[in-house]
Image (cartoon, rainbow, N blue to C red):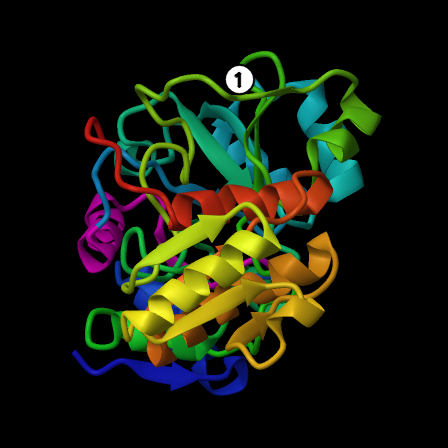
Amino acid sequence: MDTKVLDIKDGLDLAVELLKNGELVAFPTETVYGLGADCTNTEAVNKIFEAKGRPQDNPLIVHIADIEDVKKVAREIPDEFYILAKKFLPGPLTIILKKSDMVSPAVTCGLDTVGIRMPNNEIAREIIRKSGVFMAAPSANSSKHISPTTAKHVYDDLNGKIPLIIDGGSCEVGIESTIIDLSQEPTVLRPGAITREMLEEVLGTVGEFKGKIKVAKAPGMKYKHYAPKVPAIMCDTVEEVILKYKEAVKNDLRPVIIGKNHPEYFCLNLLNIGSNGSEYARNVYNALHIAEENYGYIIVEKLEDEGVSHSVMNRLLKATAEQPKNE
């Protein structure tokens, strides 16, 4: 398959044609690039799982262009949805609701709930509006690999597996959307740029899922994710980072550090991801891509576990974790 990379001006008509004909299109959002298909077309949705090598029990998110679209893809919509929508949508927030019959069971992996998202990206919403297709879409990368924040990341991972990538530049937020479940008591299933504290300001108490996952209601919960193809570890302190770096050099592993710009890292290979949560989020996946392409061993510095930094740590812990035996 020939994978084309086009900007929205040259690629919109082709994207619309492909989606209407049950094909896949990779597209930019403010979080990461998505891999979209018609959420009503089971055959098209299954192509997402095939292209990514994605487990069949890992549900997808449905992307809409306007708030009123939610009535077509969900049912029993609680008032809390509209409260969140008024404050945060369009934006990096996915809301779990009861699904409508319109949404293919392949999207939700047979569950009665579905994640709904309205991206804060004009290109994504223009594709949805012009095609009339609500897009089921995970991140546009091979399953469990580093998420893509540029069209190049998508091309490097899925070239030959999908027909079209719409290039919209670098993603502004840089990590996947926060997921909140409103099909039960409000609970954060995946942290993101919209933090639990921000959600509590408009909803009151919001829980955070921390239990053992048997059935995933949302992406990014059950499996190892966001992982580079070379070994990666996390260290708790700067001192430990330097120790592991020196050990890696002795073993000819070509190490690199992903973290902040500490004086102690002077003369060491460092990919600086910034000094606060928003900068970490915007830079972390690109740093992992660069590290994977140019080095043989990745040492990740543990970040502060609060606010958006907590969400970035969620991704880095999964990226550096050993695969659990029961998953």
Image quarter in which the N terminus is found: bottom left
Quarter location, residue 208: top right
Q: Is residue 160 left or right of residue 29?
A: left
Q: Position of residue 125 (x, y in %)?
A: 58, 60
Q: Is residue 95 left or right of residue 201?
A: left
Three-letter amino acid code at disc 1? Ser
Residue 185 vs 275, above or below: the answer is above
Magenta stretch in the rendered image: 31-53
Membership of 315 in magenta stretch? no
Local secondary structure at mark 1 = loop
Is any part of residue 127 visible from this angle? no
Residue occupying the point 20% across, 26% down: 326
Q: Nearer the viewer, residue 309 or 219?
A: 309
Residue 203 vs 257, above or below: the answer is above
Disc 1: which residue: 183
Quarter location, residue 169: bottom right
Residue furthest to the right: 201
Q: Number of numbered discs present?
A: 1
Q: Is residue 21 left or right of residue 167?
A: left
Crowd class of label 1 (few under 14; some 14 to 19; many from 20; radius 10 Å): some
Residue occupying the point 21% across, 59% down: 51
Q: Position of residue 6 (x, y in %)?
A: 43, 85
Residue occupying the point 38% across, 57% down: 36
Membership of 45 in magenta stretch? yes
Q: Nearer the viewer, residue 199 or 36?
A: 199
Q: Position of residue 151 (x, y in %)?
A: 44, 76
Q: Nearer the viewer, residue 248 or 102?
A: 248
